[in-house]
Amino acid sequence: MTNGTPITLEIFKGEDEKLAGTTITKFAKAGITTMEQLAYSTPREMVELTGISIKTAEKAVLLAQQIINPGFITADILHSRLDQVTKCSTGSKQFDRILGGGISVGVITELIGEYSSGKTQTCFTLSVLAPLPRERGGLGGKVVFIDTEGTFEKGGTERLIQIAKARGIDPDEALKNIIWARAYNSVHQHTLIQNLDGICREHDVKLVIVDSMLAHLRGEYLGRGTLAERQGLLGGMLGKLLRLAGANKVAIVLTNQVQAKVDGSGAYGDPNQAAGGHVMAHACTIRCRFWKGRANTRLVSVIDSSYLPEEKVRVAITEAGITDEDGSFEEITEDDGFLETCVELEKVMNLPLPIKEEDETSD
Ligand code: GTP
Ligand code: MG
């Protein structure tokens, strides 16, 4: 059992060489250097990444899983471990409270709601706060923002500057900590997600945002006949994000719009539900539902959680992003000099952008 510090694959080298040195080198070349990365992967993925045999890959993944988590543990140990989970502030103390302290690393958090309900504003606020040191409510690392709707190019960067300034954070530094990529269609989104491992390690990324997770999939796969293919692509992306969260200790935040329920159950409760069906629901550990409220306020609640109370709190969208209902938030007064280089994800990964689809130019 580990105490949270990554164990390198080098420990396999030694007297009883459980894995050949050449295999470890192949893993290293593919960017797999820690036991956690290996334990959260599938043997098939390792074959594709490194070219080793499926038998070796199965043995390696199993060995790593045994080291990371050799079996059952008592609930008190689990509890103390969960207690130490790092959380990122949302910008609102009330919102943080119902999340048990904020957005957690190691899991996927889903922000669900109608248009203009505050999902992107929450992502922006998190992007500004996550690079702050832990004692100031951040995660002390960079942010990757996969933008499927072109929000950054439609005034998003201005909004980030405004949020940073209102919170006493150097706006230039804030922007430098956000690694941005526009996903032009679902296949491009898939490629960006599959390439996140390297980016996260290289740039010490602690928060990955996909805003929105399903917009492209819903627009491109129309009709029931395409559902299986769509859900397959979605499952592939979510699987990758889950492993990234677990292996690299990253917080993942996805946004998702709601759609009308079609099975008639809407007559008795919420007439809308999150898109993405069971595949999305199972991957996302924490689901936050947003509703529009009076004036600049929004209601938010954690839904479907087995351990967080389903309490609705009111937050506000202000100059400082998401804040408490009365506009208050934790002030940050000192300039820490904790921020570094800015890189666009596409540049770093040197990925050719797919040609923009014609029907996308109109929106
Ligand atoms: P979709 O992406 O359309 O599904 O919606 P969303 O849930 O992402 O909505 P978003 O988070 O973008 O919220 C939009 C709302 O935020 C708008 O109704 C605006 O009222 C509010 N908003 C956006 N920018 C600002 C701003 O600079 N200041 C203030 N006070 N409010 C803003
Ligand atoms: Mg949005």
Image (tube, rainbow, N blue to C red):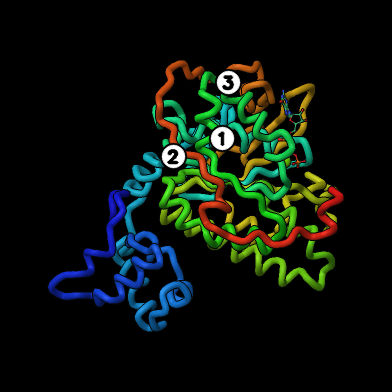
Q: Which residue is mark 2?
A: 141
Q: Is residue 292 above or below residue 281?
A: above
Q: Residues within 10 Å of mark 2 (few under 14, many from 20)?
A: many
| Residue 343 horizontal/vertical position (percent) | 52, 44
Q: Amino acid at mark 1?
A: Leu
279 in relation to 62, above or below: above
Compare residues 159 and 206 and report the one nearer the observer: 159
Horizontal and vertical percent for residue 24? 29, 71
Sort mark 3 into few (<14), some (14-19) or many (20+) by Cα contacts within 10 Å. some
Q: Is residue 63 left or right of residue 96?
A: left
User: Label 3, on which residue?
Assistant: 165
Q: CA distance from mark 1 to mark 3?
A: 14 Å
**Sequence-wise, which precedes: disc 2 or disc 1?**
1
Which numbered disc covers residue 82? none
Residue mark closest to the camera, 1 vs 3: 3
Identify residue for label 1.
126
Residue 113: image x %, image y %?
Answer: 73, 42
Is 273 left, or right, of 137 in this rendering? right
Question: Could you tell me which secondary element the residue under label 1 belongs to?
Answer: helix
The residue located at (69%, 62%) in the rendering is 354
Q: CA distance from mark 2 to mark 3?
A: 19 Å
Q: Which residue is painted at 34% across and 66% down in the image?
A: 28
341 on left or right of 254? left
SS under mark 2: loop
State if disc 3 and disc 1 touch (CB < 8 Å). Answer: no
Q: Residues within 10 Å of mark 1 (few under 14, many from 20)?
A: many
Instruction: Say what secondary structure mark 3 lies in.
Output: helix
